[in-house]
Image (cartoon, helix red, strand yellow):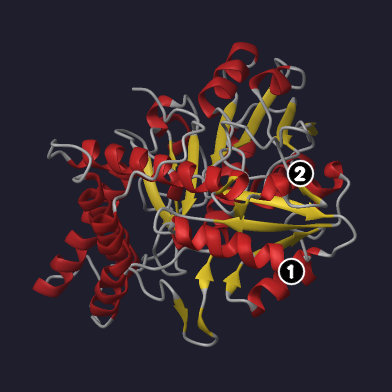
Amino acid sequence: MQTLKPSSKASVAVFDDALMSQVRARFHHVDRCPYTGPRIFFENAGGSLTLKAVVARMAEVAALPDNDHRDNDASRAISCMIDDGRDAMASLLGVEDGIVFGGETGTECLFRVIRAAASAAPAGGNIVACELEHPATFDATAQWARRTGRQRLTVPFDPHQGRATAEDYVRVVTPETRVATILHTSPVTGMTQDVAAIAEAIRAIAPDCYIIVDGIQHAPHGALAVSHYGVDAYAVSLYKVFCPFNDGYAWVSPRLGCADHDRLAGKPDDAWELGSRDPAAWAGAREMVCYLEWLGGHFTDKSERRQRLLAAGQAMHDQEAALMRRLIDGADGVTGLRDLPGLTLIGEADSPWREGAVSFCVKHRDALEIVAELGQRGIRVHARKDDAYSGNILRPLGLPSVTRVSLAHYNTPLEVDACLAALKDVLGA
């Protein structure tokens, strides 16, 4: 199975008006903030809009007082909800073996998995991370290299491209690399990495290395095929995939799944959940997957869940690519980001690897100021700055902060045009 193709330069939206109306009707607060009034939401990398069906289903299940593994009908129903949610998440991730488990957050899942991998790997050697990564992996690898007495090596990313490649990893990975991490898509540069190619390159040098992927930013922007990446773990956070802020989820391979890790003594070797997980979260996850099945049904005649999820992923990917091209290039009578005076894009304007987000800096203007002024004009965006979350990425770029516009498949060309018009006004262009 092939992973999604990089974005093309096509700027033709794949959702027609009728489908877009149906899509937007399924989300809460699609064009209005309950606190500030009408607004356009381009802060999806900080958390997506939430599906109405997910909120309703989670509220229904959260009201139940029962737990699973009890001898009553409510408990048995809850057990089925958890099983159904786990099966739905496995289908979304594209995995057929290993363990899918829920945790506190995606970051917490990644810290736990990295800890287990660092503890299970043979003594000595090194741990490799990329300087493009979110602290969920970048900081975790530093901590567990130190705590296990290993060297931590870092892979520089290309500041011009805003991404890292297999060749970048080859220059750092050694036969003694025990654990390596990969960021699927950067929430700062907006660029995606070729996970399968990087994993293959790592394995050619260090065949037994545990490879762990942060898929949190990538998950809402295209189909997942984790079983085909050649990795040992993959984590997502569903607050970026149309669900409320609740749990993170991770998949671990059979090899890593049975490695020594935190668990209750009486549980099986491959048990990863500590205590009872929230059944409402699993029910919400299943509802989100049902939405993607519905969406995929508009782009394939196949009825199987996995095939519909793949179709939905490709459609979202293509829709967002068209919106991103419009944002960067502009349209008739609307100036795109690349042509606004004093504005510099992070990463190449025509990169086929851009996915869902674009960041930029403006000469002599502070990103926080630009975000505030756009907010006054009803455009919700965000600034990434040199802090605990983005400092390791911005410092190689030589920037104290950037403005980020992040979109999703439910955004429209008219919203893109409104964002560009407001930004042009802010910049006095």
In the rendered image, residue 162, in percent from the top left (x then y), is placed at 71, 37
* As drawn, 81 above or below 130: below
Query: Given the image, on which type of amino acid does mark 2 rest?
Result: Ala
Q: Position of residue 149 (x, y in %)?
A: 79, 37
Q: Residue at x 29, y 79 (%)?
A: 59
Residue at 25% in and 62% down:
22
First along the sequence among labels 1 and 2: 2
Q: Residue at x 55, y 27 (%)?
A: 194
Q: Quadrant of the N terminus?
A: top left
Residue ranking furthest to the bottom: 35
Q: CA distance from mark 1 to mark 2?
A: 40 Å
> How many numbered dots are placed on residues in this image?
2
Identify the mark at residue 142; answer none if there is no mark. 2
Query: Is residue 115 depicted above or below 210 in this figure?
Result: below
Where residue 89 appears, as percent x and y from the top left, is 32, 49
Left or right: residue 238 compared with residue 427: left
Q: Is residue 20 visible?
A: yes
Q: Residues within 10 Å of mark 1 (few under 14, many from 20)?
A: some
Task: Note whether 119 is above or below 40 in the view shown.
Answer: above
Disc 1 residue type (three-letter): Val
Quadrant of the snapshot with the C terminus: bottom right
Query: Looking at the image, which is closer to me, 229 or 296?
Result: 296
For this orientation, the residue located farthest to the front is 333
**Does 403 sit left or right of 21 as displayed?**
right
Q: Nearer the viewer, mark 1 or mark 2?
A: 1
Task: Report which residue position mark 1 lands on.
Answer: 426
Of residue 180 and residue 324, the one placed in the foreground of this image is 324
